[in-house]
Image (tube, helix red, strand yellow):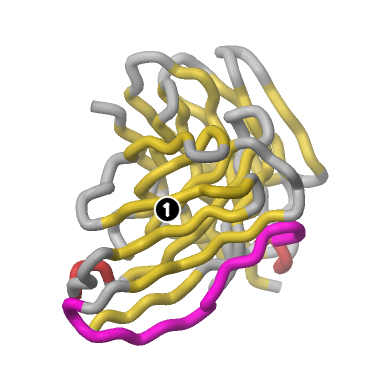
Amino acid sequence: DAGITQSPRHKVTETGTPVTLRCHQTENHRYMYWYRQDPGHGLRLIHYSYGVKDTDKGEVSDGYSVSRSKTEDFLLTLESATSSQTSVYFCAISEWDAEQYFGPGTRLTVT
Amino acid sequence: EDQVTQSPEALRLQEGESSSLNCSYTVSGLRGLFWYRQDPGKGPEFLFTLYSAGEEKEKERLKATLTKKESFLHITAPKPEDSATYLCAVQDGQNFVFGPGTRLSVLP
């Protein structure tokens, strides 16, 4: 987890509210990723970034948006949280678009 | 559609009892295959990258191998501290597809 922090680490929110998760890195890596991990599904890619202001969709991007205004920060926003977005969210970074280094995760519960 | 399966789902070993974990994949254009270790409540920890069939990588008691359709993670003389979930992932372009993992328990 060195060099990658996620905040908050735990959050409980109500259906319909917007939620923003933050990933912060001190490694100056170009690539950043957001995943969700659910039992029976493994890790699934939500969005990724290949540079400041450069982002693209992953496998499960519906209901999520991202922004990257600085190299070190990658924000994931749930525009209107639903119970199906209850999950553990992981941020990852990569220097060369290959092996990834993961943060400690954020456990999100939508009631 | 890219797919990754892992077997077995769970594995219990006695300390010192060597074994192998399997990762089978279907991908249109493999750029790399990755192995990670995940401890409960933590993010995955990178172990190995393999790029082409026949390639092998080793780290302590772990050895990863790759063929055209699958990868194996061999664990030699495991210790209780090797207990974790081991994840396999493939990269196809900018897409990363993870398998569901193998939960390994090593008993003293």
- Disc 1 marks a residue whose amino acid type is Tyr
Q: Where B90 sits versus A14, above or below?
A: above
B21 to the left or right of B46: left
Question: Could you tell me which residue is drawn at 68 percent across and 43 percent down?
Answer: B47
Residue A32 or residue B56, whichever sits in front: A32
Circle 1 Cα neighbour tier, 10 Å, few/some/many (<14 / 14–19 / ≥20):
many
Residue A49 x %, y %: 49, 39
Q: Quadrant of the C terminus of chain B?
A: bottom right
Residue B76 or residue A94, whichever sits in front: A94
B34 to the left or right of A43: right
A11 to the left or right of B105: left
Q: Quadrant of the N terminus of chain B?
A: top left
Residue B81 or residue A58, whichever sits in front: A58
Q: Where A14 sits versus B37, above or below?
A: below
Question: Could you tell me which residue is drawn at 39 percent across and 51 percent down?
Answer: A66
Question: Could you tell me which residue is drawn at 68 percent across and 34 percent down?
Answer: A95
Q: Chain of mark 1?
A: A
Q: Is residue B38 visible?
A: no
Magenta range: A1-16
